[in-house]
Image (cartoon, rainbow, N blue to C red):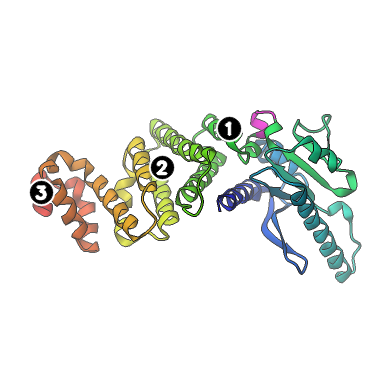
Amino acid sequence: MTRFIHDRFAKDLLTELLSPIGTVNIGHDVTAEVREIDVYFIPSTVIPEYSATLGLLGKMADTAAIFEPFRNAATVGEVISCMSKLWDLRGELERQARRENTRYDDAKLPLLWILTPTASKALLEGFGAVPKPEDWLDGIYFLPRHLKSAMVVIHQLPETPETLWLRILGKGKVQQRAIAELRYLATDDPLRIIALELLYQLQSNLVTDTEQELQPEERELIMAIPSLFREQLEAAQQQGLEQGRQTQQRLILENFLQVRFGEVNSKMTVVLSPISKLPAAEFTVLLLAISMLTVDEAGREQAVRLLAENVLRTRQNELEDILPTALTNLLAMPVDELTLFVEQLPQLSADEVRARLE
């Protein structure tokens, strides 16, 4: 199950990064047997400055491309399967050319990029894959010319800004170091924001995957991502982007609750705004606490209670002696009354708060 979670992350990240400069098709079907291409990219808009920010990925996107990312080292059979998709697509394009009474141009066939964290020497030699050091970085291996294919061995790529967006699709320490490098990008960098949103979704999906035991590296990944979000939120706060920080926290929380529980119920929605105003450190702690809850109705009720506790946190000193009762009464309010109370809470006096909750 976790393999599919990582596959989804890889496809989403490639889609977000490449869509400004071309058309991205995820899950393109070819042949009657329905082989599904992971990411099929056709360049359209030339934006040299943007392509440069993608580094090596931008160079790979200069021409039509198929990207097939693997979480674990690609096997011989998996490489052959990827190449079969390419030949199936070639047949599809040839048939299209005949229908349109045009000449098929093999130069327009996409280049297949197989993204694998590692690859053995035997695998590379078996497919005749060789580096092109005069044109490409270490870790890039090209198959014979007419096969229109290349392997990217992510863990062999130099750890430079140019390779960041590929190394973030790696595994273990390589991926974790790439994620850590996001902190060196400007906090308002669109690529950093996109990557953080997708990484947080990846973390949420890993946490909620109860069907399979997580690997140690995945547990480390789960712990690494919230700290990066905390840095992002604190940096935004320090730069005076308080409103932006609150908006970002609200979106993060709403997405997290939806991914974990399948829906955001009415009482959760009411408290999203006040929760989004929490300091970054407290917000991160809250997310971690919710991530430890069970994914069922009991977990959803506990999540609502945690959110309500944090709504009362700003008035905790005034309610300390009646806090359990205050929390129970707050949760018992009808949604309309709860909405009004939450909106008025910052302006209410201590006596008014106690009168409403005691």
Q: Residue 88 appears at what percent x and percent y?
A: 81, 61
Q: Residue at x 51, y 51 (%)?
A: 212
- The magenta-colored residue range is 158-163
User: In the rendered view, does 110 fall on the left or right side of 72?
Assistant: right
Q: Residue 37 appears at what percent x and percent y?
A: 71, 57
Label 1 – label 3 distance at C-alpha: 51 Å
Which residue type carries mark 1? Lys
Q: Residues within 10 Å of mark 2 (few under 14, many from 20)?
A: some
Label 1 – label 2 distance at C-alpha: 31 Å
Q: Residue at x 86, y 71 (%)?
A: 99
Counting residues from the start of the chain, the first of labels 3 and 2 encountered is 2
Instruction: Give me the disc on residue 283.
Output: none
Q: Which residue is mark 3?
A: 354
Per the image, label 2 sits on a secondary structure element best described as: helix
Q: Which residue is mark 2?
A: 244
Label 3 – label 2 distance at C-alpha: 32 Å
The answer to if 161 sits in the magenta stretch is yes
Q: Which residue is mark 1?
A: 173
Q: Nearer the viewer, residue 214 or 278?
A: 214
Query: Which one is closest to the eye, mark 3 or mark 2?
Result: 3
Per the image, label 1 sits on a secondary structure element best described as: helix
